[in-house]
Amino acid sequence: MRPAGKKAVVIGAGLGGLAAALRLAARGWSVTICEQTDSPGGKMNRWEANGFRFDTGPSLITMPWVFEELFEAAGTRLRDHVEMVCVHPLAEYRFDDGTRFIHTANLPDWLTIVRRFEGGDASGFLGFMELGARLFEVSKATFFKQSPFDRPDPSAARVLRQLPLRHGWGAYDKTVRHFFRSPQLRQMFNRYMTYVGSSPYRTPATLSVIPFLEYAFGGWHVHGGLYRMIEALVDLGRKAGVDLRTGARVTAITHRTGRADGVELESGTHLDADVVIMNGDASCAPRLLGRRDARPLPETHRSMSGLMFLFALKKTLPQASHHTVFFSADYATEFRHLFGERRFPDDPTVYINMPSRTDRTMTPGEGEVLFVMANAPANDGDAWDEPMVAAARDRVMARLRKSGFPDFQTDIVASTTWTPRRMALHYDMPGGAIYGQTSHGWRGAFLRQPNRDRHVPGLYYVGGSTHPGGGTPTVLMSAAITSDLIRRYEGL
Ligand SMILES: Cc1cc2nc3c(=O)[nH]c(=O)nc-3n(C[C@H](O)[C@H](O)[C@H](O)COP(=O)(O)OP(=O)(O)OC[C@H]3O[C@@H](n4cnc5c(N)ncnc54)[C@H](O)[C@@H]3O)c2cc1C
C-alpha cells in the first residue's frame, strides 16, 4: 500500500543516507536528501586529476551481499549497475624487521604461510576463524539486524545464548595473543580493529568477527572505483523520484509539534517532513535540534581519523600490490600515541591502496594511483597546518623507505592531502573521526546511537555513527534497520 504522500528528509547524501532514501522511495515515500557539500557520497567520495581517478575514502568492501540486498530492495540487481571485483590476493604485509608476506584467501597457500610463522602449526589460525564464524552466526541474527535498544526479537535472544564466551569475551588483543604466537601474525590480526577506527588493545574480542568476514567473503573492489557504487545509487534514486539537493546545508531539525517535522536549510528554506533521517554524524543532532546542552562527541570517545595523501604517479609499479600495509616497529606504542597521548605517531603504520594494480581504468594509461593513509587522532585542537602536515608526511615517507617501498617523489604528477581537520570541516564530523564513536569496551562497540531517537519521535539515524557502526557494509545494514523501524513506527 502506498503511503499517500508521506515525506522523508534525509540529512546527508553519504552511503547510508542514499541507501535509506532508496529503501523508502521503493516503498512509496517522497524523499528529499539535503547534502551540504557539492557531491553525494559523503566519505565515500572521489577525486580526479590529469585523468587519474581516486577514491578518497573506502578502498575495500567486505560482505558484498549486503550491497546486493540494497539493490534488490530497490527492485533491481547489483550486477546490472556495477561490477564488483574480488581482490586476489587480499593484501601484502611488510614488517619492520624486513619480513613480508602475502595474505591470500587461497587456503592451502595461506596455511603454508601461517605454518611458517607459527612453528609448523596452523591450529591457532583455524581456531580464530572458528571463533569468528560463530560470532558471525550470532551477529547475523542480532547485532546486524537490530539495535540493542530496540524491542528484542525472541529468536535473537535464543541465538545470543550461543555467544562463544571463551575467547569471544575480554580484550581483542588478548584473544589474538591466545591464538597466535608469531609477532607478525599478531600485528596483522590486531590491525583489523582499525577497520572500526579503534585500538586492538581496547576493543572487545567479539570483534574477532571482522577478520573472519574478510577471510571468508573476500575483499572487493568496484570496477572503475568504489565511487561507481555511489553513482549507481544516485542514478537509482533519481529514477525512483528521490530529490537529491547538493549545496544544501541543514542548520536545524524542526520539532514544533513535539516530533521531528522538517528541516531548515542555511538558505532559509524550510522543508516539511513526516520523518527526518540524520545521516551526518549522530552526535551533531542535538545541535541541530537546538538543545542548549548540545556538546560535540568528547575526544576520548572518538574513533580515529586519518591522514591521507593521494598521489598520481607517472611511473607504473608492476611489482606493487593493490593493498599493502607497512607496519610500524611497535604497534602498542603507536596506539599509545594515537589514543593515550592523542597525537600523530612517531612511527605510523602506513597503508597503501593502489587500485590501478587491479583496475587500469583508474589511470589515463601508464602510471598508478596511490592512496597513502596513516591513522591519526580525531582532535579539535590540531591545526594540521603546513608544518604539521610536513612533519607527519616525513614520518610516513620514512616508514615507506624503511619498508622498502620504491621512491616515487619525482614521479608525482598530481596530489592532494586529506587531514583530519579537512574531513572534520568538509563533512561536519567531530575531529574527522571516521567511524563516529570508538568501539572501545562493550558500550562503545555495541551501544551506539540507536537508529530511532529515544526522545524525538519521527527522528531517525543512519550511517556509521549509529548502530551497527562504521564501514560500508554496516552502514548499509543501518539503512535496512532504520527503514524497518520507520515501517514499524510510522505505519508503513
Ligand atoms: C579514508 C577512509 C577510508 C575508509 N576505508 C574504508 C574501507 O576500506 N572499507 C569500508 O567499508 N569503509 C571504509 N571507510 C568508512 C566508510 O567510508 C564510511 O563508514 C561510510 O562511507 C560512511 O557513510 P555514512 O552513511 O555514515 O555517511 P558519511 O560518509 O559520513 O556522509 C554523511 C554526509 O552527511 C553530510 N552532512 C553532515 N551534516 C550535514 C548537514 N547539517 N546538512 C547537510 N549535509 C550534512 C556530510 O557532508 C556527508 O556527505 C573509510 C572512510 C574513510 C574516510
Image: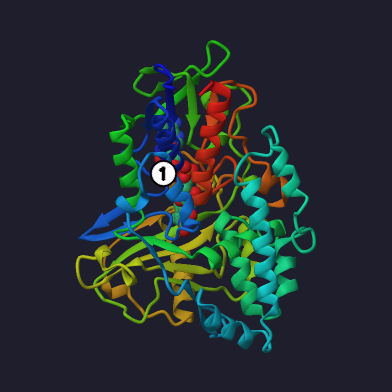
Looking at the picture, which amino acid does disc 1 mark?
Glu
Tell me which residue sits at (41%, 68%) in the image.
Answer: 87
What secondary structure is found at the residue carrying circle 1?
helix
Res. 184 visible in picture: yes
Tell which quarter ligand 1 is in.
top left
Q: Residue at x 48, y 81 (%)?
A: 402
Quadrant placement of the N terminus: top left
Residue nearest the viewer, comparing 207 with 75: 75
Q: Nearer the viewer, residue 268 or 196?
A: 196
Q: Position of residue 113 (x, y in %)?
A: 57, 84
231 on left or right of 299: left
x%, y% of residue 210? 60, 60
Coordinates of residue 315 in the picture (x, y in percent): 26, 76
**Whole-percent x, y for residue 408 in the image:** 33, 75
> Mark 1, residues whose alpha carbon is within 10 Å: few (<14), some, or many (≥20)?
few
Q: Is residue 401 above or below residue 11?
A: below
Q: Is residue 341 visible?
A: no
Instruction: Report the label total.
Output: 1
Residue, x 55% and y 50% (percent of image)? 378
The quadrant holding residue 282 is top right
Q: Is residue 354 above or below residue 273?
A: below
Q: Which residue is mark 1?
A: 72
Give residue 332's quadrant in the image. Answer: bottom right
Q: Residue furthest front?
A: 1
